[in-house]
Image: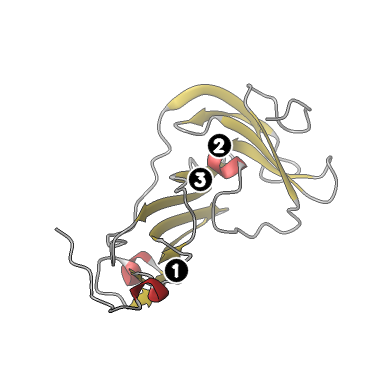
Amino acid sequence: MELEPDLGEDAHKWGKECLACNGSPSQCGGSSLPGLRCDPDQPNCIKVSITAAFEQDTNQIMIKSCSNSSTCPGSAIFSNGQHPVTYSAHHECCTGTHCNTGYFTDTDAGSENGLECYSQWSPQSVTTMKCRGDMTHCIDLIGDSPGNILMSGCATESFCQGLYPHISVPGWRNTTCCSESLCNHGNTTNL
């Protein structure tokens, strides 16, 4: 049974309260965090575990907050072949007061799924890679023109749809995804 605070007659004006944090997994884990009073148009609480692994650095961030999204995308994952998971945002949504408790969720890339994509993490590094788990799309992160491919690899459908917190890739302007083997890297079979 979940107990919710009595906010009086004006409860509909205040919305619910979610745990709030934006920082490292050690700072944001658990339930002893400050509360954030949500606007009425933010009916859900959210917890997002983000992993970004570029070159030799791997960073993990956790976000807990209110959310106005009516859907929760699950995991948005991208790999450029240099790491099993290059970027991952794992979302968990809930509707109760302070329901976004818990600790960081690590993303497992999963086993090979049969899809093969072109992989690129620098202009000189074009190879192929086998996609894993829920990464069922080939992807290109494109710069100023269609031929200016900054990175290529495998991604989940939710990553292709842009359902993740912003990541900074210098010059990245557009994304194209497709769902057949070796359909990316400038080929025209789009999703």
**Picture quadrant where residue 181 is located:** top right
Label 2 or label 3, whichever comes before in sequence order: 3
Q: Which residue is mark 1?
A: 40
Name the kind of residue labelled 2 in the image: Glu
Tell whether 103 sits left or right of 82.
left
Secondary structure found at label 1? loop
Q: Residue at x 82, y 44 (%)?
A: 148
Camera-side mark, 1 or 3: 1
Q: Which residue is mark 3?
A: 76
Camera-side mark, 1 or 2: 1
Name the kind of residue labelled 1 in the image: Pro
**Picture quadrant where residue 140 is located:** top right
Residue 49's place in the image compared with 158, above or below, is below
**Callout 2: 10 Å neighbours few (<14), some, many (20+)?**
many
**Callout 3: 10 Å neighbours few (<14), some, many (20+)?**
many
Q: Which residue is mark 2?
A: 157
| Cα gap from disc 1 to disc 3, whole angstroms | 27 Å
Tell whether 77 sits left or right of 150.
left
Residue 125's place in the image compared with 191, above or below, is below
